[in-house]
Structures are given as C-alpha cells and as structure tokens.
Image (cartoon, rainbow, N blue to C red):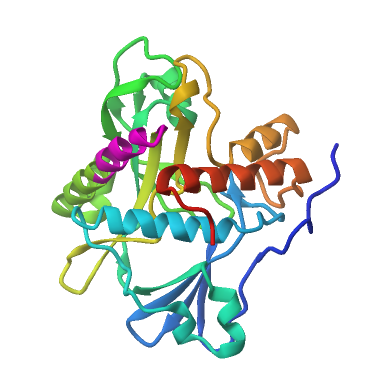
Amino acid sequence: MNAPYKTFMPAMFESNIKSLPLIARGKVRDIYAVGEDRLLIVTTDRLSAFDVVMPTPIPGKGVVLTQLANFWFEKLQHIVPNHLTGTAPESVVQSGEREQVAGRAIVARRFKALPVEAVVRGYIEGGGWKEYQEKQSICGIALPKGLQRAQQLPEPIFTPSTKAETGTHDENISFAETEKLLGAKLAAQVRDTAIALYREAAKYALTRGIIIADTKFEFGVDENGKLFLIDEALTPDSSRFWPQDSYQVGTSPESFDKQFVRNWLESIKWNKQPPAPELPKEIAEKTGAKYREALERLTGTTAT
C-alpha cells in the first residue's frame, strides 16, 4: 500500500475562527454565526466518502468548491434565489483570521434548512443503479425495463433522501415521505425547482463537454416560507460529472469528483464505518486534480 498522503502542500482540515460563535462543523463546511440573521460558511479541504469524513484533506478543494458554487448560484438565480449576501467574508472576521476565509468562505443569509436532500438524477449510476437492479425503481419511481448502467433516463427524476448526521448514511425516501416531512405544496415546489435547476445546469455543462449525471441540492425557507437555494450547488462534492467525450453506456464512467477515493476505498474492503483510513498520496493528488479540472472546464477559470 502507498504511504498515506498528508503534507505535500498546505491544506485546511478545519477552520479556527475565534471572533465568531461556531454553530456546527459539517462533513466539509464549518459554520459560524454573524449576528442573528447571517452565517459565515467556511469550505474546508475535508472530503467525505460514503458519508464518512476522511482524515486526509485535499489541498485547495475548498477554494474550488466555493468558486464553482458561486458560479452556479449566479447562473441559476433566475430559477430560485439563493442565500448569498454579497458581503466579503474578510469583513466579518478579525484581521488575523482573514487568511482562513480568503477564497473559501461566503457570508450567507440564515434560513430554516429543509430536512431533505433534493437529489435529481438524469442518468442511472451509483446507489440509483444498485436500487434499480434490485427493484426496477428508484425511491418508488418505476423505471423502464432493460436500462443499462450509466444510461440517460427518459426524463430527470427527483429521488430525495433524508439528511444524515456526520458519520451516518443518508437514506433514500419516496416522494410521499417527502410530502409528510415538508407538506404537499412545499414538497412539490422543492421537486420542481430541483429538476429545473438540474435541467438548466446539465444543458450548460454539455456545452463545456461535461455530463452532469446526478446532483443534490439543499433548500431553506425564510420567515415567510419563501424557498431559497442554500449550502452549495453543482460541485464535484454534490454531483457526478462525466467527460462527454469518453462517456459510454454500460460502463462506470470516469468522473470529475471523488470517484478515485470511492474506488480505492472499495478496493481495500473498508467497511464504510468511521474511522476512515488515510488516503495514499496519489489518490489525493488525482482527486485534487479532478476537482480543479471540473472548475476549469465548467467556468473557464482556475482556482484562485
């Protein structure tokens, strides 16, 4: 086995902002309170796979995720408003803490987060492929017979899941269960908005040579019940990006995300329970390179 990868360049495993109250550390993001109605969200270089945080950070990953999410927030804001405030993160922390937030943090409006991951699938792969093989359906949605792995679905489908605590697994739920959690009207709005976001993003990505196979969104509501896109959007952490030029039905396509990590973890027969093993240097390097390539392909810019 290769030597664990730890220090080939600086990385931020977690932030340490003392000037603001820490609300939570998620799988990837550290969240701080900025007054009563705003949040400082710092995207670290942590990486999770199979819903478990790896002990090995991917240097620069947080910067890539932040730049890419901000690109999509701007591009898709005509479909649904988002949580961005436009406030510079450096302006809400002390001078000695600015380096921690530069390029990897946002100041967001504070909303009530909905307890559902809004997953949209345009192609059949991953957990969706496994469920289809067993049931010929995904999240209670019946699908045509004879679909092959990685095949495009006739129409994008909404396959929600419950949000898991760090270290536990998300669980797929049916739309009926989503209605119980959110109410029928809001559940329908979340479904329709998520599918509209996916359609628009997937159409654009194809012009950049990338297939968005599936993705997940998170939504929140304000005090009036108005829906907002929160957290992040359409990054390699929340989406499967495939290169269009090498895509082939019936195979598991190469992807611009953490698939290198998933494949390596599967190869060592890890039980997908914490603690996770340290990643070999080459796996971490390849993963970082894939994240940067996704940013460059989709936006035409490099991580800064």
In the image, residue 39 above or below residue 278: below
State the quadrant of the N terminus. Answer: top right
- Look at 29% across and 41% down and name the residue there: 198
Nearer to me, 281 or 216: 281
Q: Position of residue 53 (x, y in %)?
A: 63, 54
Left or right relative to 194: residue 14: right
Magenta stretch: give its range. Answer: 197-210
Left or right relative to 198: residue 131: right
Residue 27 shows in this picture: no
The answer to which quarter of the image holds residue 176 is: top left
Nearer to me, 79 or 39: 79
Q: What secondary structure is the magenta-colored segment mainly?
A: helix
Residue 56 shows in this picture: yes
In the image, residue 42 above or below residue 63: below
Q: Position of residue 221 (x, y in %)?
A: 24, 66
- Look at 75% across and 41% down and name the residue there: 282
- Look at 33% across and 69% down and name the residue there: 84
Nearer to me, 85 or 263: 85
State the quadrant of the C terminus. Answer: bottom right
Q: Position of residue 150 (x, y in %)?
A: 44, 22
Magenta-colored stretch includes residue 206:
yes
In the image, residue 123 above or below residue 163: above
Left or right relative to 176: residue 205: right
Numbered label tally: 0
- Look at 66% across and 46% down and name the residue there: 273
The answer to which quarter of the image holds residue 227 is: bottom left
Q: Position of residue 16 (x, y in %)?
A: 62, 78
Left or right relative to 114: residue 222: left
Magenta-colored stretch includes residue 284:
no
In the image, residue 61 above or below residue 157: below
